[in-house]
Image (cartoon, rainbow, N blue to C red):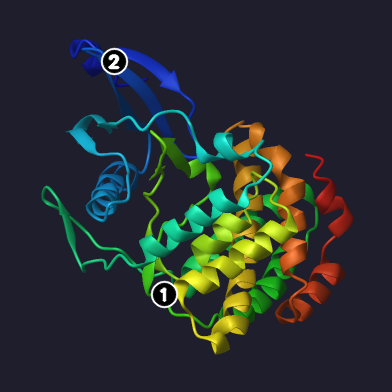
Amino acid sequence: MENGKILIKMNYKLKKISGDASFREFYRVKKNNKTSIIVFAKKEQYKNLIVYSVVNKILNSHNILSPKLIKNYYKDNMIEITDLGDNSFYDYIKNKKNKLKDYKKLIELIIKLQKIKLKNIYHFGKKKIKFSKYSLNNLHKESDLFFDWYLKFLIKNKNLGKIKKILRKELNNIYKKLYFKNNCFTHRDFHASNIMMTKKRLSLIDSQDAIIGNPLYDVASLIDDVRIKIPKNLQDNLFKHYIQKSKFRAKDQSYLKNDFDILSVQRNLKILGIFVRLYKRDRKLNYLKYLPYTWSLIERRMRNPIFNKLNILFKKHLPLKKLKKVKI
């Protein structure tokens, strides 16, 4: 760790803990029999340290347990935050037979998040933080990772640029069919590994990418989580639970399903690209095991007639059997 000297001066006992898919490093530190977490950001310090601190403060102010800022060492590319423990919802739920009751609580947590009314501007010292909306450009920028990393490294085709242009055009048509406005707090990475079980209470981490987005985004992120296989009947029950608890109108249900499917496909195309990028660029091999299930989720959601043309274009332009075998 480049800035370990400052921690040594503080008489901290350091223990590196497992990180995530970002440029951050996490250290559990012990002092006076109390533990805390040091977040060290190699890159994107503004987002990973400042925005993260602001979002956590917002969440805590709405009684959603998140890490609290203890000390700001922004000039040294790190912050110290409260320790929410090691027990993730993923660890808690993965071997549990009856998952519905626990997962319903996560759906209700999403609804609670969506009730947060964000201000136009937040302050962190002299810095101003403004949350943007999940624009059409954002959607494309993310799903472009599928073309620029997943396809680029799995198939050798001199016409890849032309294929990207054709598929991107149809994705654009699909994204424009999103019905619900970007009008609610969206965590943007809401899945079982980013929810902690802290003294039997749900807590939320990894919130630095929060944005004002579509209400179905976090729902799709949870239900179509690529890291944990959820049976189809459980997925369907959770979606119904969201509709019931969020009190959408009955006539909105078909729009809700369309938006869910569109955002699930968009997110998981992005994830295919990110996981290959983590392997190729960062030598993180662990994420490759999730690729086949990610494909199966994409296929399931693309059964929606809204994807009819994209399905035809996929079959015409992509060697799908080769792509799904994921031999890198």
Query: How many numbered discs?
Result: 2
Task: Judge from the rendering whether residue 55 lies leftward or rightward of residue 311; answer left or right.
Answer: left
Q: Given the image, on which type of amino acid does mark 2 rest?
A: Lys
Q: x and y percent of residue 133 in the render?
A: 37, 70
Depth check, front residue: 144 or 256: 256
Q: Judge whether 304 appears above or below 10 on screen.
A: below
Badge 1 or badge 2: first in the primary sequence: 2
Residue at the bottom extreme?
251
Q: Residue at x 24, y 17 (%)?
A: 7
Residue at the right extreme?
321
Q: Residues within 10 Å of mark 2 (few under 14, many from 20)?
A: some
Q: Residue at x 48, y 70 (%)?
A: 245
Q: Judge whether 72 appears above or below 242 on screen.
A: above
Q: x and y percent of residue 325 in the render?
A: 84, 46
Residue 73 visible within the image? no
Depth check, front residue: 242 or 280: 242
Q: x and y percent of residue 182 in the render?
A: 41, 75
Residue 169 visible within the image? yes
Q: Given the image, on which type of amino acid does mark 1 rest?
A: Asn
Q: Secondary structure at mark 1?
A: loop
Task: State the residue position of label 1.
Answer: 182
Q: Which mark is residue 192?
A: none
Task: Judge from the rendering whether residue 52 lies leftward or rightward of residue 226; answer left or right.
Answer: left
Q: Judge whether 155 appears above or below 17 on screen.
A: below
Quadrant of the rendering where the N terminus is positioned:
top left
Q: Which mark is residue 30?
A: 2
